[in-house]
Amino acid sequence: MLKIIKFAIYIIVMTTCAMQTSSCTHNDNIVSVSAPEFEKEIKSDSVQLVDVRTPQEYAEGHIDGALNINMQSDDFKDMAQRNLSKDSTVLVYCRSGRRSLDAAEILTSLGYKVVNLKGGIIEWKEVGLPVVSEQEN
């Protein structure tokens, strides 16, 4: 049953991207979506939200519920494999979308299903979506 749900979510994302090319892009096996679409994905069951920025950037403000795995860390792959399940889609973001796209490529090569936030947390904030800081947690 869980596999059917995951497959259905994947089909919905792919269909959405096909219909709304301005809000979604597809790079090999990586889906990049707009901030509103990313927010919808976060609300889905069994997804993992990952902020791939530095711990300092994360502390300044991040999407609520995000796990911080620093893309620039030498042990990024190890940290991802220790903390993420391949049974759930991984939602990744960074500041502007570049690092998270790199992280998405790495995670995809490790066997994860990944959705990237196009435009990063900059785009997220620009459309008025909320962030939390370490002081608020």
Image (cartoon, helix red, strand yellow):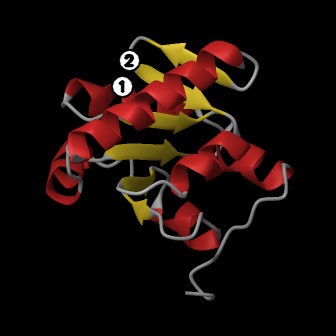
Compared across the picture, whether 101 is left or right of 29 comes to: right
Q: Residue at left 61%, top 88%?
A: 135
2 or 1: mark nearer the eye: 2
Q: CA distance from mark 2 to mark 1?
A: 8 Å
Residue 118: x and y, percent? 64, 33
Q: Quadrant of residue 111?
A: top left
Compared across the picture, whether 133 is left or right of 5 comes to: right
Q: Nearer the N terminus, badge 2 or badge 1?
A: 2
Q: Residues within 10 Å of mark 2 (few under 14, many from 20)?
A: few
Compared across the picture, whether 93 is left or right of 119 comes to: left
Q: Residues within 10 Å of mark 1 (few under 14, many from 20)?
A: some
- Judge whether residue 103 can be spotted in this image: no
Which mark is drawn over residue 105? 1
Above-or-below relation of 132 to 57? below
Q: Secondary structure at mark 1?
A: helix
Q: Residue at left 58%, top 61%?
A: 57
Residue 38: x and y, percent? 61, 44
Residue 61: x and y, percent? 64, 68
Work out which quarter of the rendered image holds the C terminus and state it: bottom right
Compared across the picture, whether 101 is left or right of 40 comes to: left
Q: Which residue ends up furthest to the front in the rendered image?
A: 1
Which mark is drawn over residue 29? 2
- Judge whether residue 8 can be spotted in this image: yes
Q: Amino acid at mark 2?
A: Asn
Q: Secondary structure at mark 2?
A: loop
Q: Amino acid at mark 1?
A: Glu
